[in-house]
Image (cartoon, rainbow, N blue to C red):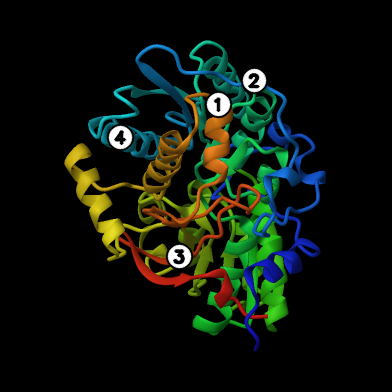
Amino acid sequence: MPVMSYKSFKLALAGIVLLAVAGCDKVNETPAANAGGDTKPAATGGDTTTAANRPASTGEGNTATGDTIPIGIVASMSGPQQPWGVDCVNGAKLAVDEFNKAGGINGKKVILFPMDDASKADQGKSAVEKLIGDNKVLAIIGEVASGITLQMAPTCQAKGVPDVAVGATRDEITDIGNEIFRVCYTDALQGPVMAQFAYKDLGLRKVAMMTDKTQPYSTGLSKSFAAAFTKLGGTIVKEEFYETGQTQFTAQLTNLQKLNPEGVFASGYFPEVGPMVKQAADDGMKIPFFGGDGWDTNNIAQTGGKAIIGDYYCNHYTNDEKSPEVQNFLTKWTAAYNSKPATAMGALGYDATAVVLNGLKNAKGLNSKDLRDAIDNTVDFKGVTGSITLKGHHGDPPKRALVVQVQPQGTIFKAAIDPSQLTN
């Protein structure tokens, strides 16, 4: 089959997929927290699109004064998303410490202001307002969750302060305006990546889906996967639904088991996916489960038990990858924290912060407007999670995606898939 270009791939998906998240949009992203978010058409975030095509901010932003340069980060340092938030902030701190030790900007040091949103979208919005208004930050880093990012980003856009999202994969986030960027891939990539992996690598032809109907990330990712899997020639035998916080899945799993699927795509988050897979095994479903970056935490091997060992999910990063960038990052992380990152958000938090710091080095002045322009002109920045180019890409860097396999102590690297490797 012919290989599609990244641009063609994104355009083809935009017309058929209602996408959400990231990856990562994470836990507690309820329809109430994202009112109206699902009514917007899917974005074509991977196309070569100039910043001029996005709404331009009229906000004045902030200017650094004195001997420090203030930068804010909003993360879920408490609540259900805590594993992502803690890693994200630690990654940001690591990047800032390195930058300051190297001299900062003309002797001025960056000061990082972390704020906890407690895994709640409204608190994320309040945190951004405080950071911009009280702390006078030049830029915001965050969030991991698309649902929280969707609440934060309009304030950044209105105030003229750039926001670099960490793991928010929902496509339309960057459509909010020219102040909004991300360092992760989008859902338009990870759904088809897992569809191709299931169809070609696992050899599956009949797949069921388990979807969290309260999470736009999950519903959108399921649609993305289903569209790509059926286009490859596979069949979705049935889609069952559950809700965030649910602990028993017997009814849904029984319905699926009757149809003898060869595998199950579970598009939700690890707090539910782990117990779900364990219950499936207890009920006699000895088939592979696989999903998206919402599975990302070492805890999934604990909540899923032996049943989830050997299953797969899409991710941005794994400690198991042997590239020099990853191994160098792990050396620095271990020296700072005496452990390895528990989630991919450590590396993505580091990369998001590094992109902002690189922007500071290239900005004409130490103010939000010049920093935004410098971030928007990022080309081939060598991040831990891959090369990051934002120039001409609507705030969305074309990124590869990884497929990882769950192991008792974390994950192991299975494949790295570039958009150009996805077949029609």
Instruction: Determine crowd level at label 3: few under 14, some 14-19, many 20+ residues with C-alpha closer than 10 A.
Output: many
Residue 101 spot, x, y in % from top left: 23, 32
Q: Would you say residue 214 is visible in this rendering?
A: no
Is the residue under label 1 in contact with that under label 2 (CB below 8 Å)? yes
SS category of the residue bearing label 3: strand
| Closer mark to the observer between disc 1 and disc 3 | 1
Tell me where residue 350 sits by quadrant: top left
Q: Amino acid at mark 2?
A: Glu
Closer to us: 13 or 85: 13
Q: Measure the C-alpha gap from mark 2 to mark 3.
A: 39 Å
Q: Amino acid at mark 4?
A: Phe
Specify which label sits upstream in the sequence, 1 or 3: 1
Q: Residue at x 44, y 42 (%)?
A: 355
Q: Residue at x 41, y 65 (%)?
A: 404
SS category of the residue bearing label 2: loop
Residue 234 spot, x, y in % from top left: 68, 81
Q: Would you say residue 52 is visible in this rendering?
A: yes
Quadrant holding the N terminus: bottom right
Q: Would you name the residue on which mark 3 appears? A: 402
Q: Measure the C-alpha gap from mark 2 to mark 1.
A: 8 Å
Specify which label sits upstream in the sequence, 2 or 3: 2
Residue 354 versus residue 220 in the image, above or below: above
The tally of labels here is 4
Q: Would you name the residue on which mark 4 appears? A: 99
Q: Residue at x 67, y 59 (%)?
A: 48
Q: Would you name the residue on which mark 1 appears? A: 368
Tell me the number on the disc at residue 60: 2
Residue 244 spot, x, y in % from top left: 60, 43
